[in-house]
């Protein structure tokens, strides 16, 4: 009898632990493209042109215009791809964007500056949870629960287009 009680309690604990995991699974249509429209503050996860999910997003603290160099506070514009993921991000979860591309590097060098890097789609750390809309150093921010869905749905290698 005691063994059954222990097994039952262990099942409950493991079940509750699984519910609180930040890692979700996704078995729907493949996300074939991500589109971010900066002016609309919207991100779309697409399957062959069909919108699967859409999100309101926060951008860099200087959202107008294309990113030109490190520290300018702008979110890049152009065609990139998802190139990495960080399950231990200080921003809950994050997926990396392949910024800078060759054009970005040339433009920054022409200004005598570094293009920067480490551009991600990510959640919100506690200190920015109640903050304004555009607060990142150039990344694309969503809520933590939205980031859990995005992290599960979007695979490395997925193209992303960021428009003005």
Image (spheres, rainbow, N blue to C red):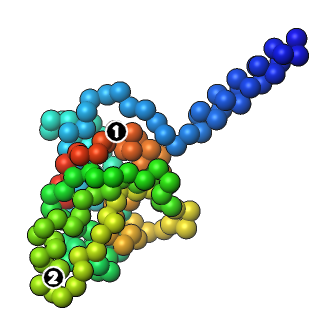
The answer to whether residue 127 is seen in the rendering is: yes
- Taking the image as shown, residue 147 lies to the left or right of residue 17, namely left
Q: Residue furthest top?
A: 1
Q: Residue 72's spot in the image, x, y percent?
A: 29, 80
- Callout 2 crowding tier (Cα within 10 Å): few <14, some 14–19, many ≥20: some
Q: Answer with the quarter of the image where residue 117 lies.
A: bottom left
Q: Residue 116's spot in the image, x, y percent?
A: 28, 74
What is the count of numbered marks?
2
Identify which residue is drawn at 51% across, 61% down.
90
On residue 153, which mark appears?
1
Q: Residue 15's spot in the image, x, y percent?
A: 64, 28
Inter-mark Cα distance, 2 to 1: 35 Å
Identify which residue is drawn at 17% across, 65% down.
101
- Decide: is 90 above or below 70: above
Identify which residue is drawn at 22% across, 52% down.
81
Q: Is label 1 in a helix, a strand or a loop?
A: helix
7 or 135: nearer the viewer: 7
Q: Residue furthest bottom?
A: 112
Residue matched to label 2: 109
Q: Nearer the viewer, mark 2 or mark 1?
A: 2
- Taking the image as shown, residue 33 lies to the left or right of residue 134, namely left
Identify which residue is drawn at 39% across, 66% down.
133
- Callout 1 crowding tier (Cα within 10 Å): few <14, some 14–19, many ≥20: some
Which quarter of the figure is the C terminus placed in?
A: bottom left
- Decide: is 55 above or below 131: above
Q: Residue 37's spot in the image, x, y percent?
A: 21, 57
109 or 148: nearer the viewer: 109
Q: Is label 2 in a helix, a strand or a loop?
A: helix
The answer to whether residue 40 is seen in the rendering is: no
């Amino acid at each position: 009898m005691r063994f059954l009680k222990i097994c039952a309690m262990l099942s409950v604990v493991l079940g509750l632990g699984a519910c609180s995991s930040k890692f979700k699974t996704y078995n729907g249509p493949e996300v074939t493209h991500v589109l971010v429209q900066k002016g609309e503050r919207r991100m779309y996860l697409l399957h062959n042109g069909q919108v699967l999910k859409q999100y309101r997003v926060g951008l860099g603290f200087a959202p107008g215009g294309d990113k030109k160099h490190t520290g300018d506070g702008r979110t890049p514009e152009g065609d990139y791809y998802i190139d990495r993921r960080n399950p231990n991000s200080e921003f809950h979860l994050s997926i990396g964007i392949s910024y800078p591309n060759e054009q970005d590097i040339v433009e920054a060098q022409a200004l005598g500056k570094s293009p920067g890097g480490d551009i991600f789609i990510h959640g919100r750390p506690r200190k920015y949870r109640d903050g304004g809309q555009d607060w990142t150093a150039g990344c694309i921010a969503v809520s933590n629960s939205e980031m859990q869905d995005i992290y599960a749905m979007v695979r490395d290698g997925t193209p992303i287009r960021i428009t003005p």
